[in-house]
């Protein structure tokens, strides 16, 4: 494990910035690029598509005041390695568990959004003693009942496009920036990503066929991830205190999916907020996250 870079991110509401250390951490033979900041109880942040650890930039400064923030690029994404396989939610959950072990973390709150939600969920199901609190945002958990309204017109078009092996990365090279920015704009309801450095830091990592192939890996593993989610719930209930946060377009679909399976579940929807909640409405998100993360689990 080697420290490679020190960068800074802004603290919301003022001119101050916080230092973020970027390092490479080997997990089961895969090198992950990991951003860390702050000290205190650990918070693991798992991004989605098309994101990197920089998705969390508006939150890191505030969270780092009281927490040890750990924000990796998932395998295949950002500046992490892009292995040939292992993009199912179960393997991504194992990556997260291995990362926490490599950083000597024995208890963490885990926050997942979009592609990062299923592995965050599976990590909590598999290791409830490791996951202190759980936050799941703007995603579905496989084919569990509860998302019928969201899926009434069919899944989003890009699911099929991304899931077809070799297709998307054969037609997108040369247009990656425009493609990624379409999602960033749509996910902020047209407001766009605040900060040229954040936008550029995300879009540059999606350039080239190999970068695209890695980013589409979770879509090509949706069937396997669905089986893993159902197997986990067949074996037990979600016992970790959990917060679901919806926006546009997922809303309460994830909450409805989880409600029959969770012992301690609170659901919220942030109004007038796009899919990319951390970049679109960071203050509203922090207002929900901070009290949930601050609560201590009662034995």
Image (cartoon, rainbow, N blue to C red):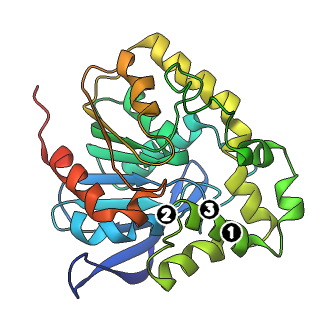
Residue at horizontal 25 percent and vertical 75 percent from the top = 12
Res. 120 image quadrant:
top left
Label 1 residue SS: helix
Label 2 residue SS: loop
Lower position in the chain sequence, tag 2 or tag 3: 3
Label 3 sits on residue: 183
Judged left or right of residue 105, residue 195 is right
The answer to whether residue 85 shows anywhere in this view is: no
Label 3 residue SS: helix
Judged left or right of residue 154, residue 103 is left
Judged left or right of residue 238, residue 215 is right
Give the label, 1 or 3, closer to the camera: 3
Q: Looking at the rendered structure, which numbered label has been put on residue 206?
A: 1
Lower position in the chain sequence, tag 1 or tag 3: 3
Percent x, y of residue 257:
45, 24
Give the label, 1 or 2, closer to the camera: 2
Res. 148 image quadrant:
top right
Residue at horizontal 31 percent and vertical 68 percent from the top = 60
Residue at horizontal 64 percent and vertical 77 percent from the top = 204
């Amino acid at each position: 494990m080697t420290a490679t870079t020190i960068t800074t991110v802004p603290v919301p509401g003022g001119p101050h910035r916080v230092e973020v250390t970027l390092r490479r951490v080997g997990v089961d033979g895969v090198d992950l690029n990991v951003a860390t900041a702050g000290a205190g109880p650990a918070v693991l942040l798992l991004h989605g598509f098309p994101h990197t650890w920089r998705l969390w930039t508006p939150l890191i400064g505030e969270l780092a005041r009281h927490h040890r923030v750990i924000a990796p690029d998932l395998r295949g994404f950002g500046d992490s390695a892009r292995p040939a396989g292992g993009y199912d939610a179960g393997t991504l959950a194992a990556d997260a568990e291995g990362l926490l072990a490599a950083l000597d973390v024995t208890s963490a709150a885990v926050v997942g959004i979009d592609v990062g939600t299923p592995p965050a969920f599976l990590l909590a199901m598999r290791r409830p003693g490791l996951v202190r609190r759980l936050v799941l945002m703007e995603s579905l958990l496989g084919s569990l009942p509860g998302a019928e309204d969201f899926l009434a017109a069919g899944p989003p078009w890009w699911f099929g496009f991304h899931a077809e092996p070799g297709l998307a990365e054969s037609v997108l090279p040369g247009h990656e920036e425009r493609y990624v920015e379409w999602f960033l704009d749509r996910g902020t309801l047209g407001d766009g990503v605040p900060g040229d450095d954040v936008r550029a830091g995300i879009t540059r990592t999606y350039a080239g066929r190999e970068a695209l192939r890695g980013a589409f890996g979770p879509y090509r593993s949706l069937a396997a991830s669905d089986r893993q989610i159902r197997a986990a719930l067949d074996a037990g209930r979600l016992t970790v205190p959990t917060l679901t946060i919806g926006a546009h377009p997922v809303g309460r679909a994830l909450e409805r999916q989880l409600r029959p399976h969770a012992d301690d579940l609170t659901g919220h929807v942030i109004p007038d907020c796009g899919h990319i909640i951390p970049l679109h409405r960071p203050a509203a998100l922090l207002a929900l996250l901070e009290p949930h993360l601050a609560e201590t689990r009662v034995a």
